[in-house]
Amino acid sequence: MELVLLTALGVGGATVFGTVLGFLFKNISHKFSDIVLSFAAGVMLAAAVIGLILPSVEYGGRFGLLYTVPGVFAGALCVNLFDRLVPHLHQLGGTEQEQHPKDTQKLNKVLLFVTAIAIHNLPEGIAAGVGFGSGNTTEALTVAGGIALQNIPEGMVIIGPMLAAGISPKRTFLVAAATGLVEILGTLLGYFAVTISAAILPFALAFAGGTMLYVISDEMIPETHAHGSERGATYSLLVGFCVMLITVVLLG
């Protein structure tokens, strides 16, 4: 349980760390941001497949695919529902760095963006927590590490639009940190859900994997390919995937 709690703090803390970097480096280029986010996407992709989806098939036994396939789609549909309820990154009329809201309407738009990130952090946190239910600490830490890595650039980009909207630096930091708190709660929720009932583990693993695959495909990849850095972003994703693959093999 201590390891789970430390992991939850690490996953949520990664957002806070990214927020601090966002204050220190306010003029980050699109190219650099896309490369970093693509690397994180590659890590998350490997973590989702190796740490969640394949174990789902394994723990499901003879009929593992009957749990895994519906679980993947259920996870994706869950995040898709969140998207419909609260628009996310690419649905707010441009990237975060490009927005310079000056009136109440635009301020509300920025707060909506922050709320969306917080909501999306919940299933990501659940994914980190569910991994520990399998009993394979290496795979669980792999998934959590991939999510934490993705949270760093997300924490960085959340700073710009809030400061531009006239929100004070102190309040901006607190709001950004609160999005990380959601991830901590999600991690604990995912862990306790699978420990209460081991029967739901195969479906829960696949569900968590599906949420990550959806975020990667629907949000991270389009965002990193929207500013003319497609080639670099693609190779960065491959590097991230291979780094995580090598890490899993060496630690396994």
Image (cartoon, helix red, strand yellow):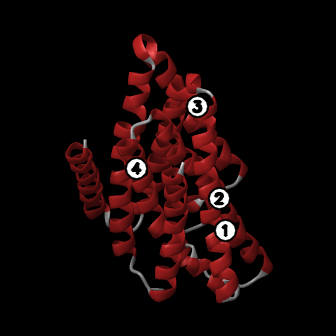
Question: How packed is label 1: few (under 14 Cα within 10 Å), some, or many (20 or more)?
Answer: some
Nearest to N terminus: mark 3 or mark 2: 3
Residue bearing mark 1 = 178
Of residues 194 and 164, which is closer to you in this image? 194
Q: Which residue is mark 4?
A: 141
Q: Amino acid at mark 1?
A: Ala
Q: Does any portion of residue 146 appear in the rendered image?
A: yes
The local secondary structure at tag 1 comes to helix
Name the element at disc 2: helix
Secondary element type, mark 4: helix
**How busy is the neighbourhood of tag 2: few (under 14 within 10 Å), some, or many (20 plus)?**
many
Residue 110, placed above or below residue 51 = below
The residue at which mark 2 appears reads as 182
Q: Real-space Cα distance between discs 2 and 4?
A: 19 Å
Residue closest to the far top: 62
For the residues labelled 1 and 2, say whether their Cβ atoms are less than 8 Å apart: yes
Q: CA distance from mark 1 to mark 2?
A: 7 Å
Label 3, on which residue? Answer: 74
Dot 2 amino acid type: Val
Q: Separation of disc 1 and disc 3 at Cα? A: 27 Å
Compared with residue 197, is residue 75 higher up or lower down, i.e. above or below? below
Q: Amino acid at mark 3?
A: Ala
The residue that appears at 64% across and 88% down in the rendered structure is 169
Where, quadrant-wise, is the C terminus in this rendering?
Answer: top left
